Image (cartoon, rainbow, N blue to C red):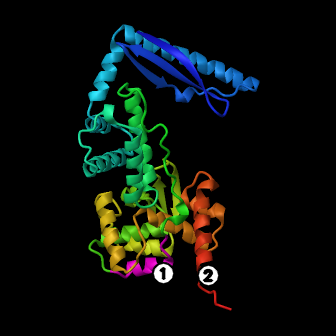
Amino acid sequence: MSVTLRKRKNADGSQSLLLDIYHNGKRRYEFLKHLKLDKGTTLTERQRNKDKLETAKKIAAHRANELESHNYKVIVDAGRKADVIQWMQAFVDKYQLKDKRNVQGVLNRFITFLNETKQNGLTFGDFSENIAVDFRNYLNHISIGEGGASYFARFKKMVKRAYKDGLMLKNPCEDVKTIKYDARKKDVLTLDEIKLINNTPCQSNEVKNAFIFSCMTGLRWCDVKGLTWKDFDVKESKLKVLQGKTQKEIWQNLNSTALKILERQNKEDKTIFKLPSADGANKTIKALIKRAGITKKITWHNSRHSFGTNLILNDVGVLTASKMLGHSTLAHTQRYIDAADEMKQTASEKLSIEI
């Protein structure tokens, strides 16, 4: 029974740290990837390496104590046999942050993935990196826009928590990178298409009005759903919005189209829009887009992307657009500039002739 801290040289000159754990006639290796040693060519690197080694020694001592108290074997064996889905559902049930619906959403998708790949009853002992890679690719295949990347990022956090809780010796998601989505590829509704949507019959005018309102204001789903008449300043034609994502309060100027949408709504209700669940609203929007003859892939978030891109296309300054979108930095606004430039290039190509 022993725990030995070892170093392994890498091709780039750095060194990896690992624990050589020998227990009950079996040898296991626990790689401390977050404590990888630098080359040590500078004073700063040498000091950083010294700190990492001290941390690694503490981890090794902790593992040795677990072995002596028999806790290590109990944790590993229990973890290997634990059902992944049951543990994740318990995690979601206790989850308190505002993105709980999204965390439950990624778990639902993981359950579907396991069903489709005939891996029901997955335990942490069988949870491999290949499964994580396949699930990441599955999410990117079934998701629209940046949804796949967003879901997988939340999935990785759940798996990391399970690893930290001692259910696995190695985090299967640690080396699996989230595929970043290119925001310029997100479909944008032009002003003519928004007008077409307005004139298209819909099974829920409440959902249609709220969606067009988002196209005219750039407000997210969570912001629109919670709007009340108390947030509306009639005299100034402004709307006070506490952004659900950033918790930043902004005053949104309303154009004539947005004001006309508000005129359609029942002012006796507390909230401006009486909306169903996010999934229900997106299903309605999907049917509406199809009925309007628009072939683009559109969800509620495309309304915000359309608003930002249309601002840039209509020569609104970047700083002004950034403030209207409630961005904390201009870097967030860059995606709309890129999308607008791409649309201008596409439009320009339509004027090309053969000479």
- Rendered residue at 46%/69% (across/down): 215
Q: Residue 58 vs residue 26: left or right?
A: right
Compare residues 72 and 2 and report the one nearer the observer: 2
Q: Point out the residue furthest to the front here.
A: 25
Q: Residues within 10 Å of mark 1 (few under 14, many from 20)?
A: few
- Rendered residue at 34%/64% (across/down): 282
**Can you tell which mark lies on residue 349?**
2
Which amino acid is tagged 1? Asp
Asked if 59 appears above or below 317 in the picture, the reply is above
Q: Position of residue 7 (x, y in %)?
A: 58, 21
Q: Position of residue 88 (x, y in %)?
A: 31, 37
Q: Which residues are magenta?
A: 188-200
Name which of mark 1 and mark 2 comes first in the sequence: 1
Q: Residues within 10 Å of mark 2 (few under 14, many from 20)?
A: few
Q: Main secondary structure of the magenta part?
A: helix
SS class of the residue under badge 2? helix
| The C terminus sits in image quarter | bottom right
Q: Position of residue 66 (x, y in %)?
A: 39, 12
Compare residues 28 and 292 and report the one nearer the observer: 28
Which amino acid is tagged 2? Glu
Q: Which residue is mark 1?
A: 192
The residues bearing labels 1 and 2 have C-alpha atoms spaced at a distance of 19 Å
